[in-house]
Amino acid sequence: MGEHSQCTCTNNRQKKLDKEFARNTTCHGLSRLEQAQNPTMKIFWTLAVLLCFGLLFWQVSVRVITYFENKSSTNIEKVYNIMQNFPAVTICDYNRYRTPNMTEADKYLLYTIPNLIYKSSLEGVDVSELLEEYEYNITAGYPGGYNLKEVEERVSWNMNESLILCLFDGIPCYSKTKIFTPVFTDFGLCHTFNIDGSINFTQWDIGAGHGLRLMLDMKTEEYGENFYDLELARMESGIKFYVHPAYEPPDMKANGQSVSPGLHAFASIKTELTVTEEPPYGHCNKSASLQFYPRYTYSGCMLECMRDLMLKMCNCTPSYIPGNNAQCSFTTTNTCIQEVKEITRRTFACFHCTQPCEEIVYPTSVSYATFPTEGIGEKIASQYNTTTENIKKNHLMLDIYFTDLYNHTITITPAVTPTGLLSDIGGQMGLFVGISVLTVIEFLEYFVKRCYYMCSNTDPETENGRGQDNQVNASSDVEKLELENMEMRN
């Protein structure tokens, strides 16, 4: 009987607690459910509360799953500037070597042997067996020895000799030799305008004529590509140009636009900045740096990675690799260096090279017009002591200019941040069931009391009341004893 009465008492206390919590909690719907007298209204509010809690858990689970999927969002912003700093421009000739600058030994090294190697590889002959013989013949042609980089530099295209006109914002360029710097690339010896950004070229107005304007004489009659077999020769005439930041080494094989003689190319550019995040939201590394370049770029990282592999496997590098390294001989270039290139192309040897966290690119749109007109052709021919036919065959014009003065910024950020997730969950809780942080504390208090009632036969509040009653009774007894003592004395 005693245990049954204690169990009944505990159940009664728990029911009383449930009712008090449902009536007084700030969580919406529970008070309406507890106060509903009509069975229909009780069923209605039960379904309404269950539906809202179900929607809450569904929405919260969706947001939590989205957060852990590490998705990103893209924000595009245009910021107007009163002027734009002009980037670097690298220009390459499709013709690798100029025949007037070449000796017979140069032609044998740069033309004859590549053709022989190509034909031998097609016939299934082991090229490595022939390279020693070729190297011997090359050495005989250069009694004092040869450096492949120095040979290429001596016989390659010299832009300063081809440059007829150079204007920036309609003003003649200060010094051709300072503005255009020779630079070795994977496309050959090229020339870069404003390579280090030391000269402050700025464009204040948009459109052609306010940027860089060049006129070049390509001298196609000096092209040495004719000595190559058809499969090895570059069949184009003219130039390939690439607009890039001054700190970025140009990757001319992968990038660039072309202009052929007899055309005037109008290249409109704009500034585009991409800002991305480190993993898991992006694939960049903010702490990445390079040994030979002031800022991290993907092309610079690939060149330095290939340099390390080439020095490790070949103990030398070709001319376009950065650093004061030993230059490879012809034999090494056609064996070991080709093997390294194949490794980097087919494996993940340079997997650590990722996109930079901040990358500036200059998207370029090119349109063309015939150059020159008859009247202008005659004036140019008269001024430079040539003919109109020769100008149409060899000359080209190139205009590079900003099409607007905006900075187009693309920012890649986490789609859901920790703060955003917390705010989203709070908003969903407030929308569906009216729960706040204080409401959560109310639920915790309720569960603590309920657990206490289940584990104990006493009510903490009742115990506190009994303790206070005992203290009151004790104090009353003391007062009664004092009164009795006073009466006896009297």
Image (cartoon, rainbow, N blue to C red):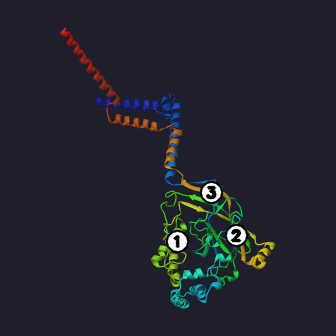
Residue receiving disc 1: 303
Q: Considering only vertical position in the picture, is 69 above or below 11?
A: below
Q: Residue at x 62, y 57 (%)?
A: 408
Q: Is residue 6 left or right of residue 24?
A: left
Question: Image quarter for residue 1?
Answer: top left
Amino acid type shown at disc 1 = Leu
Q: Which mark is residue 407?
A: 3
Where residue 11 sits: x, y (%)? 37, 31
Where residue 115 sits: x, y (%)? 60, 86
Q: CA distance from mark 3 to mark 2?
A: 24 Å
Report whether residue 228 is seen: no
Q: Secondary structure at mark 2?
A: strand
Residue receiving disc 2: 398
Q: Of label 2 and label 1, which has the lower sequence position?
A: 1
> Is there CB contact under 8 Å for labels 2 and 1?
no
Where residue 331 sits: x, y (%)? 52, 84
Q: Is residue 172 left or right of residue 302?
A: right
Amino acid type shown at disc 3 = Asn
Q: Is residue 456 left or right of residue 101?
A: left
Report whether residue 144 is seen: yes
Q: CA distance from mark 3 to mark 1?
A: 29 Å
Q: Of label 3 and label 1, which has the lower sequence position?
A: 1
